[in-house]
């Protein structure tokens, strides 16, 4: 926009200067003595004794030389003045568009993490300050809408946890009684599975509401230690499903929230175990170069065109709605929300032979010293081959 404005101003100046110089050339040309039929036009005042009269040939040469000199000097002056005009136009345009750059930068930085950021442009009242004030008012409305939505989700989820906990207790008590009828026991089992599913949904909504609010503060977090703890906790479950987890954990520091980062790793590892097949593999890699976290797994083939949609809430390729083990479809949505809260990125890549690889990266993260230190967790031994596969995922 600045370049277009400068070129437009320079074009207007050039057109005006050309018109002005053309008029000046025509008037100056008319003021010179005319030469006609080989004789000088002597109808004007008689020359003084100090001036010698010119013959027709000399007068014609003089007239041509004067007009040529006028054209050359006018062209040089026009070129120099045009360059100065472009320079001045660039400076003026920069000052005029500075408020626009401020608004653009504010709009670029505005996110769920900094809802309180405003432009608050100072200076005399004009169209740009009115635009900035209108933009601030729009941000106020958006902030109120975000806060209202998040408070509702958090409050509703919190209020639902107590009755669900009481309902789960009653169902478990009924199942624990030996006198319970078999039909009633089957009904209670289905109710308990449904109750666990609803509790998972509410817990996911609470985490999602918290991560969508952004981070109030950041602290250095050893992502490799977080991943090692998650893998150790998931080891029994992986063994029950006949899965092997291969870990390649290089010391890595990420500035963020430890609880949310732990939830991110838990969801990715849980998803890799949940959507796998018996005897399958799970790979967890932490450290540079590349993404700070990489979780891959074997399993069913995932269509390439549906990989990005897996991060949408309640989106599952394998439904399994009758099983609490298949989740509620919020796991990867929470992962994406936590990644945004840390100003990072997450993406999914289907494996050609089946399964998925999820890559999480955060700008500004750095490996710690010593770099050679590695954590190896889960149900794997010192199998170099599988560690190499973990790096390739």
Image: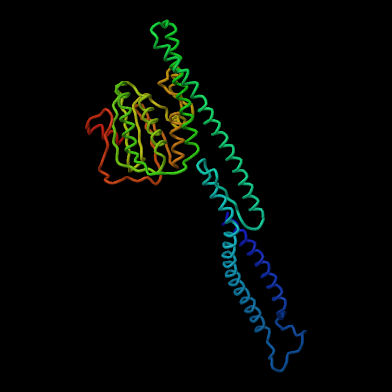
Q: Quadrant of the C terminus?
A: top left
Quarter of image, res 310: top left
277 relative position to 34: left or right: left
The residue under the point 40% across, 27% down is: 302
Q: How is the image coloured?
A: rainbow
* Most foreground residue, 110 or 390: 110
Residue 243: image location, x then y, percent: 30, 24
Residue 129: image location, x then y, percent: 64, 53
* Most foreground residue, 218 or 374: 218
Quarter of image, res 14: bottom right
Outermost residue toward the bottom?
A: 49
Up-down relation of residue 157 to residue 176 (above or below): below
Quarter of image, res 375: top left
Up-down relation of residue 72 to residue 322 (above or below): below
Q: Quadrant of the N terminus?
A: bottom right
Residue 316: image location, x then y, percent: 45, 25
């Amino acid at each position: 926009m600045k370049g277009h404005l400068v070129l437009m101003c320079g074009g207007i100046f050039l057109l005006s200067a050309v018109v002005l110089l053309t008029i000046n050339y025509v008037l100056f040309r008319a003021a010179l003595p005319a030469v006609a039929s080989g004789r000088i036009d002597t109808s004007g005042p008689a020359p003084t004794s100090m001036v010698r009269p010119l013959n027709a040939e000399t007068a014609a040469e003089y007239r041509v030389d004067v007009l040529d000199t006028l054209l050359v000097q006018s062209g040089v002056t026009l070129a120099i003045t045009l360059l100065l005009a472009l320079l001045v136009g660039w400076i003026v345009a920069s000052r005029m568009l500075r408020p626009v750059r401020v608004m653009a930068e504010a709009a670029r930085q505005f996110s769920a993490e900094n809802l309180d950021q405003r432009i608050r442009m100072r200076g005399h009242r004009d169209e740009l300050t009115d635009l900035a004030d209108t933009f601030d008012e729009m941000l106020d409305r958006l902030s109120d809408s975000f806060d209202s939505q998040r408070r509702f989700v958090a409050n509703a989820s919190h209020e639902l946890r107590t009755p669900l906990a009481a309902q789960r207790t009653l169902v478990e008590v009924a199942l624990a009684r030996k006198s319970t009828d078999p039909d009633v026991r089957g009904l209670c089992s289905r109710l308990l599975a449904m109750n666990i599913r609803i509790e998972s949904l509410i817990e996911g909504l609470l985490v999602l509401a918290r991560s969508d609010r952004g981070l109030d503060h950041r602290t250095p977090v050893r992502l490799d230690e977080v991943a090692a703890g998650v893998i150790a906790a998931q080891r029994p479950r992986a063994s029950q499903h006949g899965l092997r987890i291969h870990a390649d954990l290089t010391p890595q520091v990420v500035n963020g929230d430890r609880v949310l980062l732990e939830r991110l790793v838990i969801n990715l590892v849980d998803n890799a175990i949940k959507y796998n097949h018996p005897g399958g593999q799970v790979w967890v890699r932490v450290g540079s170069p590349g993404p700070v976290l990489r979780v891959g797994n074997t399993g069913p083939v995932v269509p390439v065109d549906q990989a990005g949609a897996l991060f949408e809430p309640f989106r599952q390729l394998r439904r399994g709605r009758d099983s609490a083990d298949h989740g509620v479809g919020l796991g990867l949505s929470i992962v994406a929300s936590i990644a945004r809260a840390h100003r990072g990125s997450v993406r999914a890549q289907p494996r050609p032979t089946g399964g998925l690889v999820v890559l999480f990266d955060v700008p500004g993260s750095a490996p710690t010293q010593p770099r050679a230190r590695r954590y190896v967790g889960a149900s794997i031994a010192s199998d170099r081959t599988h560690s190499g596969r973990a790096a390739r995922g």
